[in-house]
Amino acid sequence: MAKKITKREVINAMLADVAINGNATYVAYLENELALIEKKAANKKSTKTQEENKVIKSVILNTLASIGSGTITDIQNANSDLAELSNQKVSALARQLVETGKVVKTTDKKKSIFSLATVDGVEGE
């Protein structure tokens, strides 16, 4: 299945077209549409779940700071708040932290070990 093209991509493609670029009215309209898209993106607020996940992620980071490194189960066992959550939830949030570079994931055999990312030899954010 082909990737769905976004409105922003369509507008940029239209602005690159020579025939449209020659008409100031078209260009002004398309630039206004781009500005509206930017404004909408800037005003977007986080959902309730995203806000809750930010708190959980900070708890995961604090737990990793205290235990050093460990599996998802180790992280959950080290913190009572995380123990109440499902393994999948903590794993998904840990994966997001890995993607942002705050946590490092290493695989030992079939175990995933998580630890805080280091910056110039110093652990932390």
Image (spheres, grey):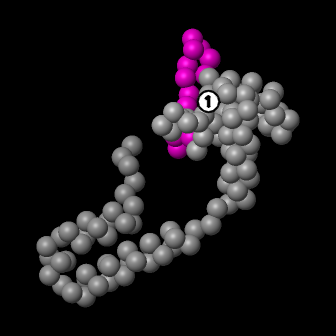
Q: Which three-letter amino acid code belongs to the residue tagged 1? A: Ser
User: Which of the 4 image quarters holds residue 35?
Assistant: bottom left
Q: Residue furthest bottom?
A: 25
Position of residue 32 in the picture relative to residue 49 (left or right): left
Q: Which residues are magenta?
A: 99-112
Q: Quadrant of the C terminus?
A: top right
**Residue 2: image location, x then y, percent:** 36, 46
Magenta run includes residue 74: no
Q: Residue at x 69, y 33 (%)?
A: 64
Q: Residue at x 52, y 70 (%)?
A: 42
Q: Nearer the viewer, residue 12 or 110?
A: 110
**Residue 52: image location, x then y, percent:** 74, 53
Q: Quadrant of the N terminus?
A: top left
CA neighbours of label 1 inside 10 A, class few (<14), some (14 to 19), many (20+): many
Position of residue 71 in the picture relative to residue 31 (left or right): right
Relative to residue 66, is residue 14 depicted above or below?
A: below
Q: Residue at x 75, y 24 (%)?
A: 74
**Residue 97: image location, x then y, percent:** 59, 41
Please tell me whether mark 1 sits on a helix, a strand or a loop. Answer: strand
User: Which of the 4 image quarters holds residue 34?
Assistant: bottom left
Position of residue 84 in the picture relative to residue 30 (left or right): right
Relative to residue 3, is residue 37 depicted above or below?
A: below
User: Which of the 4 image quarters holds residue 30?
Assistant: bottom left
Q: Nearer the viewer, residue 120 or 85?
A: 120
Q: Residue furthest front?
A: 121
Q: Is residue 50 visible?
A: yes
Q: Residue at x 25, y 70 (%)?
A: 14
Relative to residue 112, is residue 97 depicted above or below?
A: below
Q: Is residue 60 visible?
A: no
Circle 1 residue: 115
Q: Residue furthest top?
A: 109
